[in-house]
C-alpha cells in the first residue's frame, strides 16, 4: 500500500494487476503490452507505473510447480527488461496470499485495474476493483474478453489479451480518459454489484 501511495504521490497514473501466477492469467501478455505502451508512447514513460501483485495459485500442487516456475521466470524476465529500460515504471510484488481487505485497499488506490486472463472460471477481482472505487475517484477497468466478468462489466474497456496493440491502445486510452467518462463507466458497472 505504501508503494502505491508513493507512486500516486509522484503524480503518475497507477495501473494495478493482482493475479495468480499461472499460465491462463495472461501475465506475460499484460507485461508485453505495457512495455509496448512505454515504447510507443514516450510521454507515458515518466507518467505511468504498473504494479503487478503476483500471488501463488490457490490450487497449487506439486504437479503444477514446473508450470508455475516457467511462468514466474517469464514474468521476471519481462519485468527486469522493462525496469532496466524504464526505471520506476514497473514493480512486481510476489505474495503467498492476499486477503480481500488487502485487495480492496489496493484497488481503491489504482487509476487503472488491468485483467488479462486467457481463460478463467469465476474471479471476483474485476468486481472488487469497481466496488473499491465506488465512493472515491473512479478508476478504469481494463478487462479481457475471456474474463468471467466481461459480460457483466459493460463499463470496462474490453480487450483481447492476444492482441498486444489492442491492449496497448486500451492502456493508453485508460491513461487519458476524462473524469466524466470514468464516472459514467463506473456507474454502468455499479448497477451489477
Image (cartoon, rainbow, N blue to C red):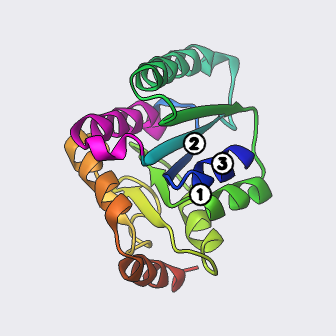
Q: Nearer the viewer, residue 65 or 91?
A: 91
Q: Nearer the viewer, mark 1 or mark 3?
A: 3
Could you tell me if the residues under marks 1 and 2 are in contact, i.e. CB atoms within 8 Å? yes
Q: Which residue is mark 2?
A: 19
Q: Which residue is mark 1?
A: 125
Residue at the location (45% across, 81% down)?
A: 183
Q: Tell me if I can see residue 163 in this picture.
A: no
Quick one: label 2, few (<14), some, or many (20+) residues within 10 Å? many
Q: Which residue is mark 3?
A: 6
Q: Earlier in the sequence, mark 2 or mark 3?
A: 3
Number of marks in the image?
3
Q: Tell me if I can see residue 160 in this picture.
A: yes
In the image, taking residue 47 as reference, residue 40 lies left or right, namely left
Q: Is residue 27 magenta?
A: yes
Q: Is residue 55 above or below residue 148?
A: above
Give the number of the disc on residue 116.
none
Q: Secondary structure at mark 2?
A: strand
Q: Is residue 27 above or below residue 4?
A: above
Q: From which residue to which does the magenta span run?
A: 24-46
Rounded to the nearest whole Å, what is the CA distance between mark 1 and mark 3? 23 Å
Rounded to the nearest whole Å, what is the CA distance between mark 1 and mark 2? 9 Å
x%, y% of residue 150? 40, 64
Quick one: label 1, few (<14), some, or many (20+) residues within 10 Å? many
x%, y% of residue 34? 36, 39
Amino acid at each position: 500500500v505504501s508503494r502505491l501511495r508513493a507512486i500516486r504521490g509522484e503524480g503518475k497514473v497507477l495501473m494495478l494487476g493482482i493475479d495468480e501466477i499461472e499460465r491462463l492469467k495472461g501475465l506475460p501478455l499484460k507485461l508485453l503490452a505495457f512495455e509496448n505502451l512505454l515504447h510507443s508512447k514516450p510521454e507515458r514513460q515518466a507518467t505511468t507505473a504498473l504494479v503487478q501483485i503476483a500471488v501463488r495459485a490457490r490450487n497449487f500442487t506439486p504437479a503444477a510447480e514446473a508450470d508455475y516456475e516457467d511462468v514466474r521466470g517469464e514474468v521476471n524476465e519481462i519485468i527486469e527488461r522493462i525496469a532496466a529500460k524504464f526505471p520506476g515504471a514497473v514493480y512486481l510484488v510476489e505474495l503467498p496470499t492476499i486477503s480481500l481487505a488487502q485487495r480492496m485497499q489496493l484497488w481503491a488506490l489504482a487509476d487503472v485495474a488491468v485483467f488479462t486472463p486467457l481463460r478463467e472460471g469465476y474471479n471476483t477481482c474485476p468486481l472488487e476493483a469497481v466496488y473499491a472505487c465506488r465512493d472515491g475517484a473512479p478508476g478504469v477497468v481494463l478487462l479481457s474478453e475471456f474474463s468471467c466478468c466481461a459480460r457483466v462489466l459493460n463499463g470496462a474497456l474490453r480487450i483481447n489479451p492476444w492482441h498486444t496493440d489492442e491492449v496497448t491502445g486500451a492502456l493508453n486510452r485508460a491513461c487519458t480518459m476524462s473524469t466524466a467518462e470514468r464516472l459514467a463507466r463506473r456507474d454502468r458497472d455499479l448497477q451489477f454489484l
